[in-house]
Image: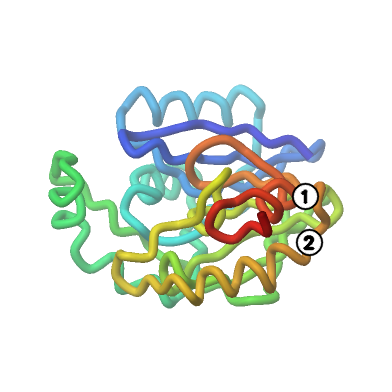
């Protein structure tokens, strides 16, 4: 399995293209905001002759959505996400204003084709990602886990030396911390964590040293 990461938009969101030898792939959190970012993502997919099977999001905060509609239109897809975050799509322009980003009269609200739930699987090529619901950063936050490769795509749930903020709509600190400790910290220590922002880390490192949920 191959993982290609891009850092997009002024908020530094990580977009991931996950593929294997079959040329099938999934795109996680298509967050490209500027035209050159979109071209970079698209060209990578086209250059490798990838077949995009799924367009999935860890959650529906606006900064993780910027490129979703372009991807959906280009490849004839709809978004898969958790239904509990759907309310976040109601007023994206005000969210842009809050963070000082221009509202360029673009409709960022995606067409959702599938609601994902705990225990679902995202299947592509010879791979599958387990869907784990872990609210707290947002009510519908998901993480995607590849057990065979010991890889976790954690969205804005768990970062290197951090966790997702819980002061936005539907956030809850205690729920987030409990979810991390009971669901993520039971994974093997060597599990590589690819977060929604910032560098990758491991479950072992965060379990030991994370200042919010670590043991030290």
Q: Is residue 81 above or below residue 72?
A: below
Image position of 167 (left or right of 27): left
- In the displayed structure, does residue 201 sit left or right of residue 56? right
Name of the residue lying farthest toward the right? 148
- Residue 163, image x, y percentages: 50, 55
The residue under the point 48% across, 75% down is 174
Please give the name of the residue rendered at 71% of the width and 58% of the height, measured from the top-left corner.
145
Outermost residue to the front: 216
Name the residue nearer the viewer: 54 or 81: 81
| Residue 66 tag number | none
- Read off the residue under disc 2: 187
x and y percent of residue 84 in the render?
42, 77
Residue nearest the observer in this picture, 131 or 154: 154
Q: Is residue 19 left or right of residue 167?
A: right
Q: Position of residue 99 (x, y in %)?
A: 20, 46
What x and y, as percent, mark residue 89? 28, 65
Pointer 1: residues within 10 angstroms few (<14), some, or many (20+)? many
Q: Residue at image x 48%, y 54%?
A: 156
Examine the rendered structure and indicate whether residue 103 appears above or below residue 136.
above
Residue on which disc 1 sits: 191
């Amino acid at each position: 399995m191959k993982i290609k990461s891009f850092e997009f938009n002024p908020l530094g969101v990580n977009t991931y293209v996950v593929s294997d030898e079959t040329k099938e792939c999934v795109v996680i959190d298509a967050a490209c905001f500027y035209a050159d970012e979109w071209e970079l993502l698209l060209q990578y997919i086209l250059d490798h002759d990838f077949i995009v099977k799924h367009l999935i999001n860890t959650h529906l905060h606006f900064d993780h959505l910027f490129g979703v509609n372009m991807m959906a239109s280009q490849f004839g897809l709809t978004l898969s996400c958790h239904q509990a975050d759907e309310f976040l799509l109601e007023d994206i322009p005000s969210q842009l204003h809050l963070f000082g980003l221009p509202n360029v009269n673009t409709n960022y609200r995606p067409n959702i084709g599938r609601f994902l739930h705990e225990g679902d699987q995202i299947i592509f090529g010879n791979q599958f990602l387990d869907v784990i619901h872990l609210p707290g950063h947002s009510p519908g936050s998901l993480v995607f886990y590849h057990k065979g490769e010991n890889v976790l795509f954690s969205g804005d749930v768990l970062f290197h030396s951090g966790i997702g903020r819980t002061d936005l709509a539907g956030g809850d600190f205690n729920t987030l911390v409990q979810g991390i400790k009971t669901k993520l910290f039971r994974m093997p220590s060597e599990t590589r964590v690819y977060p929604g922002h910032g560098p990758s880390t491991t479950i072992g490192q965060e379990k030991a040293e994370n200042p919010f949920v670590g043991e030290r």
